Amino acid sequence: MKQHERHHEQALAASPGHPQAAAPLRFPDFTRVAAQGFGDPHNAYAHTMAWFDNHLYVGTTRSNLCLIKARVPIPLSFWPVNCPQQIFDIDLRAHIWRYSPESGVWTNVHVSPMITSPDGRRVPREIGYRGMTVYQGPSDEKPCLYVATWASAKTGGQPARILRSADGCEFLPVSPPGLGDATVPTFRSLVAFQGRLFTSPVARAGAGPNEPSAAVVWMTTDPVKDEWRAASVPGFGDANNKTIFEMAVFHEALYAGTLNPVRGFQVWKTDAAGTPPYVWHPVIVDGAYRGNLNECVVAMYVFRDALYIGSGIQNGGHDRIYQVGPAAAEIIRIHPDDSWDLIVGMPRPTPQGRKFPLSGLGPGFGNFFNGYIWRMGEHGGCLYAGTFDWSTLLPFTLASSGGRRARLAGGTVDELGLAFDRLVQSVGLDNIVKFEGGFDLWCSQDGEHWTPVTTTGFGNPYNVGVRTMVSTPYGFFLGTANPFGPEVAVWTPAGWRYAPNPEGGAEVWLGRTA
């Protein structure tokens, strides 16, 4: 820790032109303000978050591990949570919660309505809310809260739509289903730029995760009037770009990051001039020359006149569909002239010369299990990066026999590499989960020198990811991904069994100094 502190002092001294940042938030500065999925552990992800009308809004996604079990073939030795045979035996209606920092009170302001599927079943219209932004279009009398949804299209419901709220209480659809594509079950990003609102589909009904019919950025100048048009050509002309996963505004341009399981992510930008589809220019290709171990751009954030990119491999750091990984994530920094630095990651040759991580930290901040840099945000002049850490899933990924000897379910340890096998054998499965379980949260005052805030999910190993961050006048809010409720699998001398989990369900934490 002392070495990290010296790094911080050096960074501040080397940062003329920038005001000195406030003291970084530390673990003791954070207080949990919501637990157990707001009292319902099926609220697994605090999937999106926004500050609107002096309140914090949080959109949830429900029972993610049960949804994964129903759709994605993952060879676990025992499923981590207790799931019914029929997925809709669970109440999958997504929620939007509102928090008043002044009163400390949470209010459930919206629950997805139920609809009738084509086969006559009653299903939720939405099972998750995945993106939020505050935007004022020509038909809006004031800034409104817009919400990107995750619909139940894959299970017989309707395609995803964009919701709008003017008062923070009533949320109504304002877009055509799927923006005209009946196969779209979800959107992820909502970004305002040049007076327009941009989004992109990130899945397709009946297909694998994160593969829409067309990897296209969509835009509208007035979402209330349903005027959505394609702002890009599919995949920016590369069929291996399976989806446009994340977007951000930086230096008078809109940046978009892709998921590319063949060559690695790409980053493109446009000034959105002229008539859509706009002209886009490549900034980074081939996963910043790490290849598909940088499969996807998961996070983007602007800090001190640079755009920070957090990478990842879909499905938690190990893409079993395309056989990518497992590998830990990186942070890349892009400058206004399109040059870039490796901040956290693996040294390697590039066309611009050999790149070394300026932080001195390897992929995942040195933690093999950090499969995503999932979210980044700024508060008090400091940049924070939160991860998805899959080490809590190890007991369910590795079968146990005899003296808990680790063996990969459905394969051999060669698939994870001899180094990983030695790690499990030498450290021990239980110790890995005990000391590594839970997300990492790191902080930097200059973008290069980083110190950990927590490496254990604020002491809860079931908090596997930081999914949302919002800086507000009342402090820095973080929302977690915690899909380990209401019942989690536990190992006993008689084998696996399910037990109630008081630490399951999404949480919200508030960081502030006294």
Image (cartoon, grey):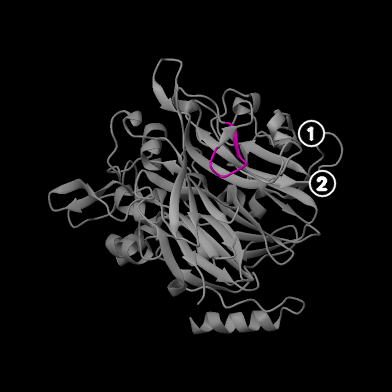
Question: Is the stretch drawn in magenta largely helix, strand or loop?
Answer: loop
Seen as rendered, the residue at the extreme right is 274
Residue for point 18% across, 57% down: 403
**Stretch in magenta:** 161-170
Residue at label 1?
277
Which residue is at the front of the view, 314 or 250? Answer: 250
Is residue 418 part of the magenta span, yes or no? Answer: no
Residue 271 marker: 2
Residue 173 left/right relative to 99: right
Q: Mark 1: give few (<14), some (14-19) or many (20+) Cα within 10 Å.
A: some
- Looking at the picture, which amino acid does disc 1 mark? Pro
The reply to whether residue 262 is visible in this rendering is: no
Dot 1: what SS?
Answer: loop
**300 displayed left or right of 97:** right
Q: Earlier in the sequence, mark 2 or mark 1?
A: 2
Q: In this view, does 17 lie above or below 490?
A: below
Query: What amino acid is found at the position of numbered circle 2 in the picture?
Result: Asp
* Quarter where residue 155 is shown: top left
The answer to whether residue 57 is visible is: yes
Q: Measure the alpha-carbon separation of dots 2 and 1.
A: 12 Å
The residue under the point 30% across, 48% down is 396
> Does residue 166 belong to the magenta stretch?
yes
